[in-house]
Image (cartoon, helix red, strand yellow):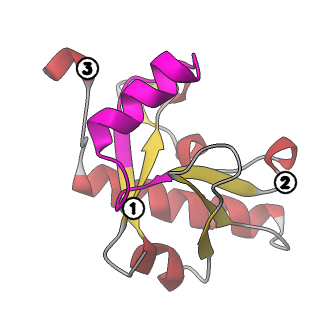
Amino acid sequence: MNDATLLLRQVNPSWIQQGRVTSQAFRPTPKDDFKLSVYDGDLITPTESWKHFTESLCFQSVGTLAVTVAECSAQDLSVRPDPEPFREHAVVDFTDLGTNQIEKKSKKLNALAAERGWLYQPEAN
């Protein structure tokens, strides 16, 4: 991974409110140990990550958004490979941040991803 690496995030349908993706899409939870699961865009395409997420892992996703490693670093969030669950898996680490910091940083990442736009949506293809 490098600064330009896209970190691909699958968007659960419940994270869409009034036609917009909520910052919940980029907010880790305590059950995730405050680590946001993403796909390493150097190892998998947005389309293939969606297929893996929905077909292999059997989760719901309305599409793929992304932020870069550099955008995470600008928020003082570290990113690292986490190939334990599958080869292309990586995490954005929010560990040791308070609730307000997590909320603020997840909103910023969500805004950056929204500005970039959808990298894959199944109904668009």
CB under 8 Å between callouts 1 and 2?
no
Q: Which residue is mark 3?
A: 122
Is 67 or 89 nearer to us in this picture?
89
> Circle 2 sits in a helix, a strand or a loop, which is it?
loop
Nearer to the camera, 35 or 51: 51
**Residue beneath label 2, please?**
33
Determine if residue 113 is in view: yes
Q: Amino acid at mark 2?
A: Asp
CA–CA distance in space, label 3 to label 2: 30 Å
The residue that appears at 53% across and 29% down in the rendered structure is 15
Residue bearing the label numbered 1: 67
Q: Residues within 10 Å of mark 3 (few under 14, many from 20)?
A: few
Specify the quadrant that holds the N terminus: bottom left
**Range of magenta residues:** 39-65
Image position, residue 117 (x, y; %): 24, 47
Circle 2 residues within 10 Å: few <14, some 14–19, many ≥20: few
Please name the amino acid that badge 1 sits on.
Answer: Val
In the structure shown, which secondary structural element does the residue marked by tag 1 occupy?
A: strand
Is residue 33 shown in magenta? Answer: no
**Mark 3 touching mark 2, by CB under 8 A?**
no
**In this rendering, position of residue 40 left or right of residue 25:** left
Q: Is residue 13 visible?
A: no
Q: Which of disc 2 and disc 1 is earlier in sequence?
A: 2
* N-terminal-most mark, 3 or 2: 2
114 above or below 78? Answer: above
Vertical comparison of 59 with 77: above or below: above
Total label count?
3
